[in-house]
Amino acid sequence: MFPRPKYVTTVVFSIFTLLFSFSSANALVFGEYLRYSLGYDKNEQSTRWIACALIVTCSLLHGVSKRVGSMAQNALGTIKLATLVLVLFTCFYILVLPESLTGIPSNFEPGRFNVPSSFQGSIYATALLKCIHSFGGWTTCHTVQNEIKGPIATLRKAGPLSIVAILILYILLNLCYLKVIPYQDFIDSDQLAGALLFSRVYGRDLGAVLINLLIAISSATNVIIVVYSDSIMNQEIFREGFLPFSKQLCTNYPFGTPVFGILVHCIASCALIYLPKNQVYNRIISVQYYPNQLFHAVLCLGLLFKLRTRFPNIHAPIRASTVTIYVCLVGSLSVVVSPFISGSYYFTLASLGTLAIGFIYWLVAFRIVPLVGRFHYVVVPRRKKDGLIYKQWIKDYDGELSLLLV
């Protein structure tokens, strides 16, 4: 879509993907809900240890055996679907049945519903990024679509159905939060809002133990899926060959799995968990998804004013409508701009700094070094012993190599 300057888009996006494709947020949610369901008080340090242990365990499952990792995904996924059904029934129980039957006081009554007196653009951006994080599974299924039987037909049917189902459930659950949990309790709960909700509905024993344990398992499902999908993405980046040690890192040896792709994901996720800050979950969501919105905005602009203008007759098998792209563009631009309007833009600096690192690497590796060394790169496909095909970048000083390859 953006071939000029040559390779800049590929390099910048690839480096960002390697550094910021992690499962830390879901792992932290798992740690918090697991501790809460077992009756422990809130402790951020212990939650971090549990989150890191989960990421390492999921990485080992996928790294040692693709079959074992897939079986674990399917088992946890079944529990997750059952949990979603339970959450749906809970929402109807809270919102539809009268208070005389449920015994749950409503905060929607006059004088009990609290509306914040002030509003900041950065708060809107953070909230929208969390919402986007909740729909991250749509991105994941596209990443691993080669693993799906009949991916186009499956995504055409299951994609819209799943998005609509999650949208409805997301709205209902947030309405339940507003109805059941007092404003200040909701603000102080951080990621444990669900724990407070189910404790008030099902009681301290069932709600705090069983239901919240199911939510913890649901978060663990997200982690084990993201570990696999991100490791595949990392492997594809290594196969492009333009990063140092790409030849060594793009391998399925010895277990037939993307070992180094999993290892990079595991290290990045665990390192991010130990950021020396409180409220690490919010910071992870902001840092991870803010640059994505910048990429989404650029992608939407390219689709609207370049591809669909120049090539109107080309239709992808799975195609977003023009109206949807405009909505995505407006939403992405609002997230990108709002922190700067409110003045609370410090969390964006780490994200933009990563993009700058990718640009500097491209500038040095693909512009300055070839110019000083008086050569240009020739890309040659290679095959490894395990059958994996990757690209090798060879320095061509006099142009003879290019002629030989032609």
Image: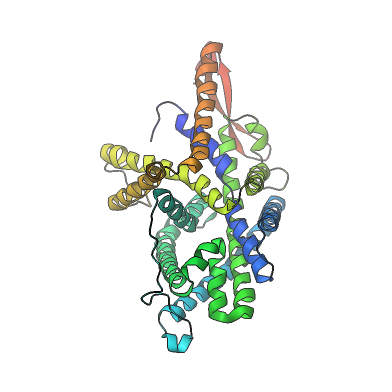
- The answer to whether residue 87 is above or below residue 139 is below
The residue positioned 48% from the left and 78% from the top of the image is: 89
Task: Give x and y (percent) for residue 101.
Answer: 46, 89
- The answer to whether any part of residue 399 appears in the image is no
The residue positioned 37% from the left and 51% from the top of the image is: 317
- Of 399 and 235, nearer the camera is 235
Going by the image, does 280 lie left or right of 6? right
The residue positioned 29% from the left and 42% from the top of the image is: 304
Task: Give x and y (percent) for residue 134.
Answer: 48, 58
- The answer to whether residue 113 is above or below residue 363 is below
The residue positioned 49% from the left and 19% from the top of the image is: 367
- Of 269 and 47, nearer the camera is 47
- Colour style of the rendered protein structure: rainbow
Residue 244, by quadrant, is top right
Question: Residue placed farthest to the bottom in the image?
Answer: 100
- Of 178 and 385, nearer the camera is 178
- The answer to whether any part of residue 242 appears in the image is yes
Picture mark count: 0
Q: Please identify the quadrant where the N terminus is shown.
A: top left
- The answer to whether residue 12 is above or below residue 333 is above
Residue 240, by quadrant, is top right
Residue 34, by quadrant, is bottom right
Task: Give x and y (percent) for residue 340.
Answer: 40, 41
